[in-house]
């Protein structure tokens, strides 16, 4: 058993913010190593679900981190589309700005698309009702103090018929693999975080945060409570990752 203590509800906001501000610089490299690069294909699938058949409009990436997903949405969406990435960590947003500059120089698919970053809290989005054609969160929901509130907010800012997408860790039930997965997350990931980022604590929080994160069926119920319909749960990577998609009523 780990002696690590998750922060209490009242301290979670400040605790999570300080963790992400601290690891912002090395976040991308660690993410690639920990997911063995697979987070890229999961994100590609998630953006495909977000855009659906519409492929263009105004999109919100909540808990955008270093901005890879927001930039991917802009690359895949039609010309004239707009993407806003929102995060509460200035450290992460600074990295997103650097990534955007680099991408705009190198990726012709970004021409005619508008990407911007906004500092704010996912539980109190600084946008009006039905401003977006779709909203997405990837590996972010788990970190919120009030998950339902985060989903309610995403649903609120999306137009009727638009999609809300959540990509996050799942709870695999595949025998044997389940044990390997738990060992990897609890024992190996903190060591990788310690080596790459010199920050074992932040990478101990990661697996521990999964212990209180709801199972996919519960996330489906939370989507329904947030006013979403046609809800799908798509398990990825043997159920270690869960993709949820819902349509705004
Ligand atoms: C694990 S990272 C995920 C980043 C990115 N979406 C990705 O898929 O790589 C979680 C992000 O959520 C942000 N975050 C956590 N709680 C937040 C909140 N209440 N409001 C806004 N951002 C938050 C953190 O700052 C961090 O950048």
Image: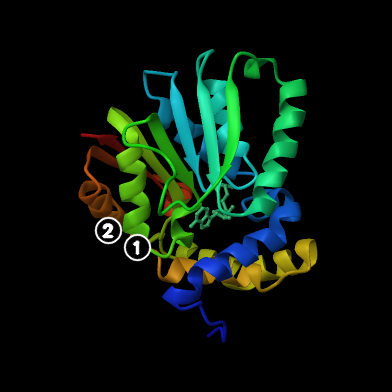
Q: Residue, x 70% and y 72% (percent of image)?
A: 200
Q: Is residue 174 left or right of residue 189?
A: left
Q: Position of residue 141 (x, y in %)?
A: 44, 55
Q: Nearer the viewer, residue 182 or 200?
A: 200
Q: Nearer the viewer, residue 51 or 170?
A: 51
Q: Position of residue 73 (x, y in %)?
A: 53, 28
Q: Residue, x 30% and y 49% (percent of image)?
A: 152
| Residue at numbered disc 2 | 218
Q: Position of residue 244 (x, y in %)?
A: 35, 44
Q: Residue, x 72% and y 45% (percent of image)?
A: 95
Separation of residues labelled 1 and 2 (CA atoms)? 6 Å
Rendered position, 207 above or below 69: below
Q: Is residue 218 left or right of residue 109?
A: left
Dot 1 lies on which element? loop
Q: Nearer the viewer, residue 52 or 141?
A: 141
Rendered position, 4 above or below 99: below
Rendered position, 102 above or below 214: above
| Residue at numbered disc 1 | 214
Q: Residues within 10 Å of mark 2 (few under 14, many from 20)?
A: few
Kindly indicate whether the residue at mark 2 contacts the one at mark 1 (C-beta within 8 angstroms). Answer: yes
Q: Position of residue 172 (x, y in %)?
A: 41, 59
Residue 245 visible to the viewer: no
Dot 2 lies on which element? helix
């Amino acid at each position: 058993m780990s002696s690590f203590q998750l922060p209490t509800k009242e301290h979670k906001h400040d605790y999570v913010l300080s963790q992400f501000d601290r690891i912002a610089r090395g976040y991308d490299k660690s993410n690639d190593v920990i997911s063995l690069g697979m987070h890229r294909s999961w994100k590609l699938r998630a953006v495909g679900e977000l855009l659906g058949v519409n492929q263009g409009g105004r999109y919100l990436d909540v808990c955008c981190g270093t901005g890879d997903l927001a930039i991917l949405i802009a690359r895949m969406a039609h010309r004239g589309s707009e993407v806003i990435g929102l995060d509460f960590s200035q450290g992460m947003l600074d990295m997103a700005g650097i990534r955007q500059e680099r991408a705009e120089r190198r990726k012709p698919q970004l021409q005619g698309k508008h990407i911007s970053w906004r500092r704010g809290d996912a539980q109190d989005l600084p946008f009006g009702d039905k401003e977006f054609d779709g909203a997405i969160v990837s590996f972010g929901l788990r970190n919120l103090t009030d998950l339902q509130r985060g989903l309610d907010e995403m649903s609120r800012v999306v137009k009727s018929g638009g999609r809300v997408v959540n990509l996050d860790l799942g709870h695999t039930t595949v025998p044997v693999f389940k044990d390997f997965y738990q060992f990897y997350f609890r024992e190996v990931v903190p060591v990788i975080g310690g080596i790459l980022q010199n920050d074992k604590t932040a990478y101990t929080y990661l697996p521990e945060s999964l212990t209180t994160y709801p199972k996919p069926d519960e996330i489906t119920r939370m989507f329904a409570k947030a006013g979403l319909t046609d809800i799908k749960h798509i398990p990825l990577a043997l159920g270690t990752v869960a993709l949820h998609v819902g349509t705004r009523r």
